[in-house]
Image (tube, grey):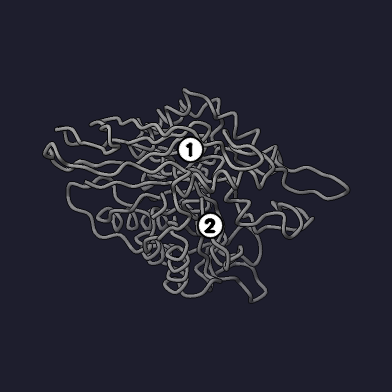
Amino acid sequence: MTSRSSLVLLLLLLSAGAAEGQASAGASAGAPEVGRVTWRATGGRIDASGLYRAGAQAGRYRVIAGLAGAPADTADIAIAEPPGPTTLVSPPRPPSLAGPSRSPSPASPPRPRSASAARGVPFGASQVWGSLGRSGTESFDLLHEGVRAGNIVQRIAEARRRKVRLLLNMTGGHDPYMSSSGGIHQFDMQRWRDSMATYDRDRIKAAVAEAVEDGTIVGNSVMDEPHARGQGDGNTWGPQGTMTKARVDSMCAYVKSIFPTMPVGVVHQHQLFEPSQSYRVCDFLVDQYQYSYGPVTAWRDAALAMAHRDGIQILFGANELNGGPKDRDGTWDCKEEGGYKGQSSPNCQIPPDSLERWYPILARAGCGFRVWRWDPVRTNDPAYQAARRAVRDSLAGWNAPSCARS
């Protein structure tokens, strides 16, 4: 029998909400009002002394602890075989009793899976949905897509039918969350929260919870490249200091207040955004490799070391369209770099032979692998198709961890 609690998350959610000027439900300007502790369980029972007593049926159950005026917390209970009537486990402590410390587990490469394990390492790309089923996409079973509240339930059902997994980007985009004041163009947290709040519907929450449980949803990313800063063109979020890891953590906390079981993360290279600081709420990092970062194994190991330090997971990836060697000879043809031109000079694509070598090295060490991005013209010739099939086959015998925190 095992249990897992996320009490620290609830404390951080309260503080993160207050830091953004909006306390979480049940919190005032000070501490949340504490009332009587209540317990309930989805299987088994809680006795008068507060101990959980498992039933006779094996399976997965939850114990929920609550306080008046504070968020509830849960512990997952896995009963591996029918236990005796005296099998006990302590239920989760309510937020007022939880200590602030945490002990993250090392983020280590997964072990090869057994023949009975399902599905292997999620492998896919962003912006694939419209091309799904066409030539070149048959190796993908992970799609990173922006999905709005109006169609997310339908999209989940369709993904399940097609046997693909979803890395969601619920709020998506960039421009809708920017505002100008005093000539400064920067990220507006309230606009982002208002967009995220459109998903706070019972039907959506039920569909997401079910999809997380059955593996259809891998997680949700709250933002792309928060390190991008300045006042120029492109997806910058504002002057330096606009985005911090603490602020991104508050975004992850807000998503978790709506979808408590869904892993929530952010997209950026581990070395580019406040590497000395730690995420304390966000579960995972979508970490994207390119040739200019140096040897792939050393870069991977540095990412895993940071993940180990912070107790997060890494969903590795690669900048396939522009992440190969740069063409520096004055003629942008990428012939010496593999023969595949990138989107703009002097960028070259990751060539198929490098793709076939690099992707498994990264993917086997994380909770998935996402390519930026699917391009049916640039990266869909026979050499790329064969390389992707080789990657897919090399991952089939591996079992990836969840993208939830260690």
Q: Amino acid at mark 1?
A: Trp
In percent of width and height, residue 281 lies at 51, 51
**Label 2 to label 1: alpha-carbon separation:** 30 Å
Front-most of residues 114 and 162: 114
Name which quarter of the figure residue 227 lies in. Answer: bottom right
User: Around disc 2, counting alpha carbons within 10 Å, would you say few (fewer than 14), some (14 to 19), or many (20 or more)?
Assistant: many
Q: Which residue is mark 2?
A: 279
Seen in the picture, residue 339 relative to 253 is either above or below; the reply is below
Front-most of residues 164 and 139: 164
In percent of width and height, residue 207 lies at 42, 28
Q: Which mark is residue 208?
A: none
Left or right of 90? Residue 280 is right
Residue shown at 18% from the left, 32% from the top? 55
Q: Which residue is mark 1?
A: 129
Residue shown at 14% from the left, 33% from the top? 56
Q: Nearer the viewer, mark 2 or mark 1?
A: 2
Q: Amino acid at mark 2?
A: Tyr
Residue shown at 49% from the left, 33% from the top? 35
Seen in the picture, residue 273 relative to 392 is either above or below; the reply is below
In percent of width and height, residue 259 lies at 47, 36
Which element type, helix, strand or loop, lies under badge 2? loop
Which element type, helix, strand or loop, lies under badge 1? helix
